[in-house]
Image: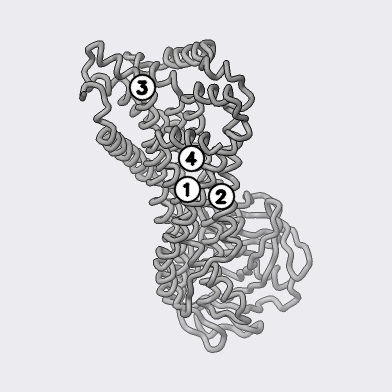
Amino acid sequence: MRLLYKQLTKEVLRNKVFVWLLFLLVFLSELSFYFVKFSIDGNAAVLESLPVLSANQLQYKNALASNTSLAYTFFFSMLGLACFVFFMFFYHFFGSNAKNFGCLKALGFTDRSLCFYFVLFTAGVSFAGSLIGLAGGYFLSDILVMANKRTYSVTGLIKGVAPFSMVVGFLGAAAILCLNAFLCYFFVRGKEPGALIAGRKRSGVRKTLLIADGIVKLLPVKNKFPLRIALRKPLAVFLIFGAVTAFNVCIILGQSLNFSSQKVFDSQMLGHNYDFDTRYPAYMGELLPFDGLPYLYHEAGLMAGGYEIEQTIIGLYHLNEVYELQDMDMKPLPLPEAGSIYINPGLAEVYGVRKGDSLSVFIDGRKYIFAVAGVAANAKAESILANAAQLAEIMGIPEGTYNGVWSMEKPAGGITTDREQRILRLEKDAVSNNTSSVINQVIGGIIGGILLFLAIYVNFQDNKQDMVILNLMGHSPKGIRRMLIDIYRPILWAVFFLTIVPSIYIVKFIQRSLSVSIKDYIPFGTNAAVIVLIFISLNIIYSVGQSVLFSIIGKTSPGKS
């Protein structure tokens, strides 16, 4: 058995580039996970142990919850990509070594012993990547810890990772990847030695060629021969699909998180012309001695999209220049009428509430039905807007009573938040998304580079024999490269245009899921400049990866002997 595993290891290590990139992908997955978790787990445990939290500590706790959801989302998304690349590796390996497997089976080695080796190999790559990712995450987490200290003005922050996070990072990742390896062995499981030694059936090759020829005939291109060659072995094309989709999603998501921070900031400033927001512990009834906008607020619960959502219902008696209510087109909205409410954009985008819907609102345990009159683009965060006279009646207090005031002058009493404090709080809330977006875009670029590099590498490996034959026929190295390698650039372009719209919808789904899980609105946003940036970046990564690969394996290229 030892000799068997030694021989299999020798065969696997013939694909050094593939193996190193598999390790790098696992390492990056673990690094991105522990980089965030080391800055979260220990501090989250400390905050949970405190009986009372300050305003800064409460904001920091909410940021930790947000980053936790992002960390798990990125981690499992990257594990999914790792499974895809491992699948491609095993597909390529088992296909190119079918005769060897036939010989091993003919010698009496069972599928069980052969499969165990590949599960063991995958576990080794997974644990090695996890261990080094853990170490790297520990040291890099200083960046997030120091950023949180400055942003949230909190002290005593520590670095620590919870046992559950260790289990997820090490055993969870290993279990998923090993299961993937076990399933991939079905490429050769149960096949007779003679069938494996004989190689791939001609009927299978003929079908692939017919499919490739049928696709190429539909394309409006003059020189169809290189495309026929590319599509006869679809592995590299699948890798390009995976690479481009992953790159699109990561970059769009990262930019969207940046846009969302600015979008939330703008929504809480545009039309909010007051300098002071004052809230009172008791209901007030006397007239204001200055020009302000009194309002009535109360905690409420909603049922929307199958979720129970905590919101603040704000009752308005009138509107003026202190607070100018606006719809999604930035047009002024009138005062909400009795029986109707305005919702915030989060309820519309995340939970699918629309104008004209009937919304169940629970106030003090009693259910009330309101008609949705529209979406207020600059509604206060996590709030709905109602008619104050009706809200006062529901609460059983006199009309005209208020417990909050927006004003240009600072009133006496109450707890007041001035404009500078409000801006500072919004800027703090934006830091978490901005940090996550940078991490996400860097990881997306690296993953896209890895997968595109693998696509070029697999293509070169599959076409080595063809390159030698064409070289012997008198074709120049430049012509061979243009025929067999450069054809993947237009394929890259086609894949980009095919996947950009689905990628946008994937990002919308991810952000909606994050918003639901952390109970905080993360608006989606992108623009044409981001799309152009992605296209340019993909071409740069492809060109650099192709140049690096040819510099590594150029000595074996035809025409250089």
The residue where tag 1 is placed is 26
Determine whether the residue tagged by mark 3 lies in a helix, strand or loop. loop
- Say which label, 2 or 1, has the lower sequence index: 1
Determine whether the residue tagged by mark 1 lies in a helix, strand or loop. helix
* Badge 4: residue crowd in 10 Å (few <14, some 14–19, many ≥20): many
* Residue type marked 2: Ala
354 relative position to 154: left or right: right
- Say which label, 4 or 3, has the lower sequence index: 3
Label placed on residue 524: none
* Residue type marked 3: Asn
Determine whether the residue tagged by mark 2 lies in a helix, strand or loop. helix
Q: Position of residue 78 (x, y in %)?
A: 50, 47
Residue depicted at 75% across the width and 62% down the height: 368
Relative to 275, is 123 above or below? above
Determine whether the residue tagged by mark 4 lies in a helix, strand or loop. helix
Asked if disc 3 and disc 2 are in contact, CB closer than 8 Å, the reply is no
* Residue type marked 1: Val
The residue where tag 4 is placed is 503
- Say which label, 3 or 1, has the lower sequence index: 1
Of 404 and 537, which appears nearest the observer? 537
The residue where tag 2 is placed is 173
Residue depicted at 71% across the width and 57% down the height: 303
- Say which label, 4 or 1, has the lower sequence index: 1
Q: Is residue 270 visible?
A: no
The residue where tag 3 is placed is 463
* Residue type marked 4: Ser
